[in-house]
Amino acid sequence: MRSGPVGESKEVAARSRRGRPGFRRAAWVALGLGLILSLAACGDASNANVGDASGAAGSGTIAKPAPRRVQLVWPTPNPAYAAGATPEAYVQPTESGLLESGLFGSVRSGGRQFHEGLDLFPIERDKAGEALDPVFAALAGVVRHVSANAGASSYGRYIVLEHPDETPAVYTLYAHLASVESGMGPGVKVAAGATLGKMGRSAGGYTIPKSRAHLHFEVGLRMTDSFSAWYARRGFGSPNPHGLYNGMNLMGVDPLLMYALERAGKLERMDALFEALPIGLTLRIAHAGEPDFIRRYPSLRARDGAAEGLGGGWEIDVSGTGVPVRWKRLSADEVAGWKRDEVRIVATHAEVLAANRARDLVDKKRGVDVPGEDLQTVLQQVFGLR
């Protein structure tokens, strides 16, 4: 990971859940952050041990090319992360003042409110106290969406990039911008570290004070190509000016985990990020078709030998925040007797689910595990369930 260029000067709507956080959730947050920091630390050691791959002179050994690794850029000019500082040196908390409230996950309102990204504060302000930091592309990619109307989303002004060179081709999102760089528009290719806009505090429907201006940064996957149909069925009563790049169609994962894996030398492909996510549950669904989600992200599918488009259903590992990260084809025999699109939860991991209590993934009905509200939304979007 390198810092942004030297010398260049959803907030996602929260879903509240009942209940109090308790020690287990707090301990899990601490454990998760500890894992990220330890990965980052071991990266320094592992990089120090990388030897000369050229081989001894005259030995006749032909060096193998080093495997390609994902090369990340920190999305703001703040050098603190690159210098090995702890999150206090770059994370912007909410008005609560709690550091964890600016991190990813069930980190707000005592664990009942989900935050789908990482909030980063500015290091430069003008005389009026407004943020001046440029915002940089974390990876080379293609602009897919620019929302320049600050009032059209809780993200405020935001930009979404897709990264076709990565496996899977994740999106990154940059929100609450004060302004968008001239020339930014759908289809524009950008280099890693390119300036996308200026950090700010724009937001639709609420106000971010200048003291808490920040970049809301996300990385994740897009759920469906049929988002407009899903949105219309839900009857939200307002138009969708963002098309496929509405925040409800974007499911983020922890950006700090991504950077920690890269620093530790464990991010040869973006797949490593999704393989590192704790699994909250495993489900099976009697759906013979192949959703556009898995066609878009085929590396998430196990090499099960099944022919493309053939099978009786799917077995899916779902992360603790609801991302369907590991897919396996099921034969028709494995779902024989099931109703079409029937869903059965076949395994749960209680500690992971408890750590993400702002996400309603599993409920009980007559003593049987069934999809909760947030998991139902994922299934509706990915499989077109009604």
Image: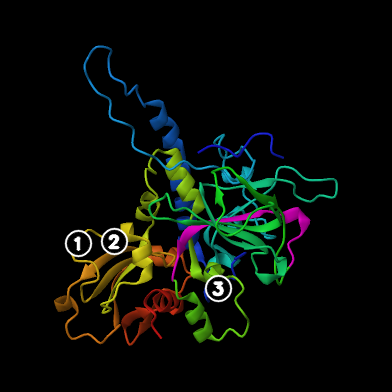
Residue that protrudes farthest toward the right in the picture: 127
Question: Is 208 a magenta residue?
Answer: yes
Q: Are marks 1 and 2 in contact (CB under 8 Å)?
A: yes
- Near-viewer residue (327 or 207): 327
Q: Amino acid at mark 3?
A: Arg
Distance CA(mark 1)–CA(mark 2): 8 Å
Q: Which mark is residue 15?
A: 3
- Near-viewer residue (131 or 107): 131
Query: Which of the two labelled residues, at mark 1 and mark 3, occupies the earlier sequence position?
Result: 3
- Whether residue 261 sits left or right of residue 239 in the image: it is left
Q: Which mark is residue 304?
A: 1
**What residue is disc 2 on?**
301
Residue 135 appearing in the image: yes
For the point 51% across and 46% down, which residue is it? 140
**Residue 157, image quadrant:** bottom right
Distance CA(mark 3)–CA(mark 2): 29 Å
Point out the stretch of residues depicted in magenta: 207-224
Position of residue 203 relative to residue 65, above or below, is: below
Label 3: element kind:
loop
For the point 38% across and 52% down, which residue is it? 167
